[in-house]
Image (tube, coloured by chain):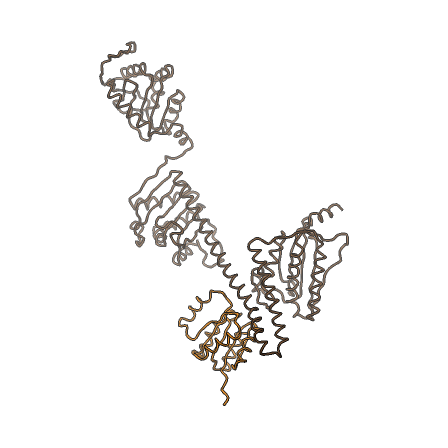
Amino acid sequence: MKKKKKKILVVDDEPDNASIFSMGLEDVGFKVDAFTDPLLALSKFKSQYKKYELLILDIKMPDMNGFELFEEIRKIDNKVKACFLTAFGEGYTEEFGRRFPSSINVSFIRKPIRIDDLVKKVNELVIT
Amino acid sequence: MIHSTSQPPTSAVREKTEILYGTENVLGSLLDFLSKAKRIDSCGDSKSPSLAFEVDIYRKLLADIKNKGIRVRQVTGITKENIRYCKELLKFGYEIRHLDDIKANFSVSETEYLATAAALRESQPIPQIIYSNVKDIVKQQRYVFESFWNKAIPAEIRINEIEKGIELENTHVIQDPQTIQKSFVDMVKSAQHEVLLILPTINAFLREHRIGIIQLLVQAAKERSVNVRILTPTNDVIDDLLKNMEVLPYQEGERTKDFDLDLRSINMSSEETAVSTVTIVVVDKKESLVFEKTDDTKENFIEAVGSATYSNSKPTVMSYVSIFKNLWKQVDLYEQLKTHDKMQKEFINIASHEMKTPTQAIVGYADLMKKHPEKRDDMMQAISRNAVRLQRLTNDILDVTRIDSNTLNLHKELFNLDDVIANVIQDHLGYIEKENLNVKLLYNFKRDINEPISVDADRDRIAQVISNLLSNAIRFTSKIMDGVIFVSAERKKDSNQKEIIVSIKDTGEGINPEIQPRLFTKFATRSFSGTGLGLYISKSIVEAHGGKMLAENNPDGNGATFTFTLPLSKSSAMKRMNR
């Protein structure tokens, strides 16, 4: 019996990054939906709801940042796990604490990350 | 009368002390006193200097003193009223010193003592006098004189003060809270030019607002054009009060007030300001009032205030002025430092983000290439694209660092600007062709061959600027049908033609109004191929050459024009003038 693939949503406004992350994760058996436009990702999520195991969201994006996107998605699926991609040195912890007082189901990935490390991290997050 | 002027002094003079009555007897006694004295030490109240001039019978005494060469030292209270007499006495060779409020009237010579036995009256002869030649009394009075003399200040200093209109300098402690409040209010009301005020706490501000001080300050600024400067901690409550008094605008950018009241917020810790407990007010650089707060929790001024020190002594007041100025400057510097620090952190954050993004692509594709040999070519291209982006970014960040630390060194040389422009255009034509872009690049070369535009500038840097402007123009024009970019360089037609204007005009998308206000700031872009640093760097390079850079959308609504100026090299300008 073929096991059903686990779904992951990747949103990063850099097309190269969105494509690298989805390729890397698809190679190890995940089903990935990747977007470079957070607003488009949100409207797709609203119109064709899917149960994602994990959201991988870039923080700094035009129109809507990763935190805002996560807040919107949580309104529909409040149990979903998220992993934020950050290329910043410091400075997001404060905003994060303010937005998400009970930091459940959330973690961070610092860019740049090797594909093997990404896969390892994602596997940990999806299993726990 | 026992003594007479003719009687020679003997060693066996009988010691006595007596009172002499009547102006005649008094005068005789004075003459007698002078006849035996070689030096006289005299103490007199502020009326005493007038007697020698205003009482006819005493005038002779002055002449006597001068003729006989008697050395006179006198301590008196020099006032506006008696200053002219004191100056006359100085001319007669008196040594005079000033002591405030001196009441004693006596003279003592080597052997004799004279003192008035009744208060002196202006221009009136002395009615009675005490005389003594008792050694112990003379000795004692000499000692009294010496102590006054040593406490007194030289007449010249005092006379100078009075003539310059200096008020009596005074520093004193006020214990009574009511008096402190009244002094504070009176001082602010009397201000003619300037009020400096340092408040230690939020509550101190609110208390002073309650007794009307803040309102009086606004009034002074509005109605008497007094410069008011306040250093105070602030919060929302205070901001609201200030808005109500039109000291602060209701909204940012709203009309500025037309009176001179400036307020700086000292919201740093008390250790940093060193002013944590006292209120300091200085009016017109002439008076200062400094008071402690004993209980900052009290709402009432009277209950909260401790003792105060009032001063109109110049050194004291000026010290407070200097403390105020230093603190004012410190607040300025502190704000600048905070802004600078914030900008630097922001720059590091954005630069780090910008560098990590292409790095992620390079690292990612390199990892994926092993598993996807069929996509090898595409991935190689992506790696190369991102590597170029990283390289460009690194160069730009280095340039920005040089600019921001003022270490952008220009290697100036004399060159023909047309040559540089032609080279840059050639490079970009190659790019347009390679990318198959639908853009026309035009340049006006119709120039008199004998009249080249020569500039004294850094050739590579100027090429960098033109290349940056041209790349931007191509990027924002290539998506438009039949886009045209027109480059020109010409001498400015007015102002004696000392400048060259280079302009790059395109028919592209134009400048986004949202980005326009921060067009020349760092990281003002969202485009992939741009670093957002190009225009900042270009403008800085142009400015380092003494030129200006401007950008505006074209009046016809199509595209934008970027222009920059460069000073024409002197030799080039000379050449024109010689024609």
Relative vertical location of residue B338 with respect to residue B118 in this rendering, above or below: below
Relative vertical location of residue A28 with respect to residue B501 in this rendering, above or below: below
Return the x and y of residue B358 as percentages of the image width and height: 57, 69
Q: Is residue B114 visible?
A: yes
State which quarter of the image contains the N terminus of chain B. Answer: top left
Q: Would residue B154 appear left or right of A121 to someone viewing this image?
A: left
Depth order, front residue of B509/B152: B152
Return the x and y of residue B306 as percentages of the image width and height: 30, 47
Q: Is residue A15 visible?
A: no
Relative vertical location of residue B202 with respect to residue B361 in this rendering, above or below: above
For the point 38% across and 35% down, the residue is B167
Chain letter for the part of the structure drawn in brown? B
Q: Would residue B58 appear left or right of B390 to someone viewing this image?
A: left
Relative vertical location of residue B4 with respect to residue B173 in this rendering, above or below: above
Depth order, front residue of B96/B116: B96
Depth order, front residue of B480/B13: B13
Outermost residue to the right: B449
Outermost residue to the front: B370
Write down the quadrant of residue A24 in the picture: bottom right
Q: Would residue B286 appear left or right of B32 to someone viewing this image?
A: right
Return the x and y of residue B314 as percentages of the image width and height: 40, 38
Outermost residue to the bottom: A1
- State the count of labels: 0
Return the x and y of residue B93 as percentages of the image width and height: 39, 20
Tint applied to chain A in the drawing = orange
